[in-house]
Amino acid sequence: MNFLTIFENDIKVLFPELFLTISILALLMYGVVYSTSSHHDNPIIIRATGWLSIQILFLTILLLINNPIHNQVFMNNLLVADYFGLITKIVLLISSSIAIIISFDYIKKERINSFEYMVLVLLGTLGMLLIISSYDLMSMYLAIEFQSLCLYVLAAFKRNSLFSVEAGLKYFVLGAFSSGIMLFGISILYGFTGVTGFEDLGKLLIFSSNESLLSSSGIILGIVFISVGLLFKIYAVPFHVWVPDVYQGSPTIVTAFFAIVPSISVLTLLTRLYSSVLHDLIQYWQPVFIFCSIASMLIGSLGALSQRRIKRLLAYSAIGHVGYVLIALSTGTPEGIRGLLVYIVIYIIMSACFFTILLSLRKRENNTQIVMIDELRALYKSNPILSLTLAIVLFSMAGIPPLAGFFSKLYVFLPAIHEGLFLLVVVGIIASVISAVYYLGLIKIMYFDKLDTWVSFEQVDKQKAIVLGLTTFLILFFFIYPSPLVLMSHKAALMICL
């Protein structure tokens, strides 16, 4: 009883994560017991576990919204609950739900019978929630490793595919290497400061009377190594080489999950660590982020031009979008954080719409999905609604006004202009023009290229149709009423900067 009294508030704040953890264990037990039951003829229960997973995520969102404690550091200063984390957690849980919803038809057509897929998605989501709440270097590292282990297994989930196993192995080897670098940086930072908590580290850097501490080469070196580990997780250049292979080799539903969900958690952590804790060392880490931003935008845009496979093109497109996010992070201002949140939410909406369309394009003749860009030829003839939806998404990703993608880039460029980072803005505009070449090239293939043989696609199922309708509506009409997202992002940015 005394134990519960001491940690009463901690349990209240952590209740959504505790509920998710217990639910995952219950779901795993249900799957293990029921799927191996000879009494029930060993049923295939992956669809049932999928719908249960969506309900679990929905209940977790409700618990987060109705949590009585919103601003508190808990678990001995290892975790934090604030408005910034609340918003990103809700976006993360909604994204995970979308990733599960659009996977049902793929699972059925590809005859994936392993219910463990849903459990791994939920475990990865739990790890991401803990990353968002991290308030200590050690809890940060453990949460990132927890998430990464789930993603490694998901990448290699299709065990009968050599490409999937190769993708998982590449991701695991390079991910382990980046984790070792990050842990080395944490040990250096702890060796020179004697603290690992974000709050203690921030106070030490702000109130230190010893100027040599702020410019200590050991502290700077530790921050550089930590930055390398975190930038790998969001696949910023030059830590991006694994992304095209992992995107291409992983099952399409796993690629969709990678594109839609994980980046928001690490970007939230980056924002909390650099814009809040290490803000006084901005002259040291800002040039690193500026370089990675410029390199990501250029490499992402130029690399996508030569791609003939859709998922590899999307991988380079994701690398380019990370460059735009790093523009906002490089400013180190509340306006930059607001732009970062707006960009992330709109990018998740666009990615969810694109991957839903990609999963919907399954050939009726041989029950296979499209792989090459050329297979989109004359799509408007066989499926005019789907081709129009894809064209809208591509225009938005290219930044054509008045679609949502234009405003996401606008809210990223404005803080950079106010801070005098004109080079980033110029490179961003040039990269946008280059990216428009391959985005509009896809539209040209869909509408103007001639088709050699007639190809018919299967009908879009109800779940994906709903996701497509909602995401397309948000992309088209975001400009009419952007205030809720902008105000929510602005409030979250102010809360983390106070």
Image (cartoon, rainbow, N blue to C red):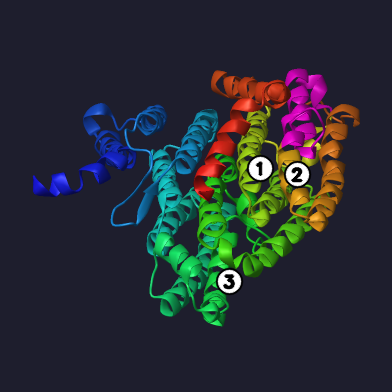
* Pointer 1 with pointer 2, Cβ within 8 A: yes
- From the image, tell me which residue sits under label 3: 224
In the foreground, 220 or 369: 220
Q: Position of residue 292 (x, y in %)?
A: 70, 62
Q: Main secondary structure of the magenta part?
A: helix
Q: Is residue 455 left or right of residue 122?
A: right
Measured in 3D between alpha carbons, the distance from the residue under mark 1 to the one under mark 2, in whole angstroms, is: 8 Å
Q: Position of residue 195 (x, y in %)?
A: 38, 70
Tell me the kind of residue under disc 1. Answer: Gly
- From the image, tell me which residue sits under label 1: 339
Is disc 3 placed on a helix, strand or loop?
helix
* Residue at position x 65%, y 35% in the image: 346
Name the outermost residue toward the front: 209
Is disc 1 placed on a helix, strand or loop?
helix
Q: Is residue 235 left or right of residue 67?
A: right
Q: Earlier in the sequence, mark 1 or mark 2?
A: 1
First to last magenta residue range: 378-407
In the foreground, 397 or 289: 289
- From the image, tell me which residue sits under label 2: 414
**Which of the 4 image quadrants contains residue 166?**
bottom right
